[in-house]
Amino acid sequence: MTAKPAAAPKMCFDRIVSRDVMRPHLTTTGPSGMTRAISPRGKTWLNASTLRVRFMGGSAAEQATAREQACWWMDYANLTFDFGNVPDAEIRITFDANDGAWSTVGTDSRTVLPNQPTMNLGFLDGGTAGHEFGHAIGLAHEHSSPAGGIRWNEPVVLAALAGPPNYWNEETTRHNVFYKYSLDQINGTAFDPDSIMLYAFPAEWTKNGVATHANDILSALDKEFITGAKMYPKSGAGPAAAAQLAVGGDRVKADIGKPGEEDLFWFTAGQDGVYQIDTRGKTDIYMKLFGPNSQTALIDEDDDSGYGLNPRISAQLLAGDYYVQIRHHERSGTGKYTIGVNRR
Ligand SMILES: [Zn+2]
């Protein structure tokens, strides 16, 4: 007689936007050791942003739990959550018990239609809401690290997740569990078995006996990572201290001092038209454009469309103020670059 198998743990998934599915994923083996709490490049909000949160349902108790756990991050990250009822809130939460727990990752929430949720809290066990808010501010899963050292026993995992309470098909399990971000796509530090962004799964799911436990609070490394240069340091003044770019004016010299660091710029588009923003130099960086007159409305993002490894964005813009976020690629050298904006 075989024992009745234990129910698989409740899993959370990142809601993947179509742009990511189209991106080629490398499967490079990472350097020795494991990496941890990872942020896929290009998902972070501007440092010091205010993210508006709207509940689309849920009981008072459910909403209170979500709010409380969101604030775990706010204590460390240089971000503010503003709970209210504005229709275009960056984070929109449903509590559909039949839809599991999931969230879009960081600025990807801007690709979701305004009448649709960007997060669902179908269950609120332990630190589930804290975990989902980790996604909402740009964090991915710990086990998605390319250097994670986890060798999945794929048939066992596929079978376990095909049953209750997840009912995932093979494609969903492959994407949410086996998929690994390429080293070029992530920011990360040392592996953290206590991260709130790690799935709990049993040892029989892996060929090398790796098991993890559920983590219901932020770990020390979660706090350190979220407040570091790669994410949302409290020392950064954010858009209030952004350097101004003059349209058609001299290029501005800038310098990346710390790996993963963010620089912020702003410019005024005096009239509607096509504008081009680009960087030059040997420093490998990633660009995002927000506006008009908004620090969270993402217009476009780019990696290497310009000279060499430089980003370049050309976009039809309405008159108004715009913010440009420049993020350093962690794995390349730091250093100088220039940035300019022109009307075409
Ligand atoms: Zn998750």
Image: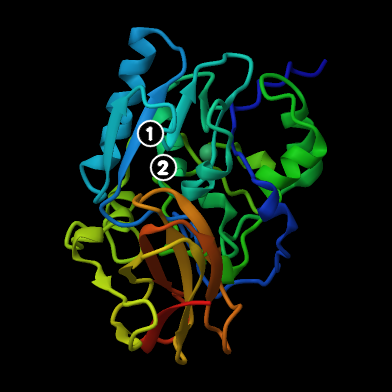
Which residue appears at 70% of the width and 48% of the height? 18
Tag 1 and tag 2, C-beta contact below 8 Å = yes
Instruction: Identify the amino acid type marked 2.
Output: Gly
Q: Residues within 10 Å of mark 1 (few under 14, many from 20)?
A: many
Q: Spatial distance from mark 1 to mark 2, Cα to Cα?
A: 6 Å
Instruction: Identify the amino acid type marked 1.
Output: Gly
Secondary-structure class at tag 2 = helix
Which residue appears at 24% of the width and 51% of the height? 78
Residue 272 in percent (x, y) is at 47, 61
Which residue appears at 51% of the width and 65% of the height? 273
* Quadrant of the drawing holding the N terminus: top right
Q: Nearer the viewer, residue 204 or 127?
A: 127
Q: Nearer the viewer, residue 96 or 201?
A: 96
> What residue did someone put label 2 on?
134
> What residue did someone put label 1 on?
130
- The answer to whether the residue bearing label 2 lies less than 8 angstroms from the nearest atom of ligand 1 is yes
Q: Is residue 332 above or below residue 169?
A: below
Q: Nearer the viewer, residue 300 or 159?
A: 300
Q: Nearer the viewer, residue 161 or 17?
A: 17
Q: Residues within 10 Å of mark 2 (few under 14, many from 20)?
A: many
Secondary-structure class at tag 1 = helix
Residue 47 in percent (x, y) is at 30, 57
Is residue 207 among the parts visible in the rendering? no
Quadrant assignment, res 181: bottom right
Is residue 163 among the parts visible in the rendering? yes
Residue 280: numbered disc: none
Colour scheme of this structure image? rainbow
Q: Is residue 255 above or below residue 343?
A: below
Residue 253 in percent (x, y) is at 31, 88
Q: Is residue 156 above or below residue 92?
A: below
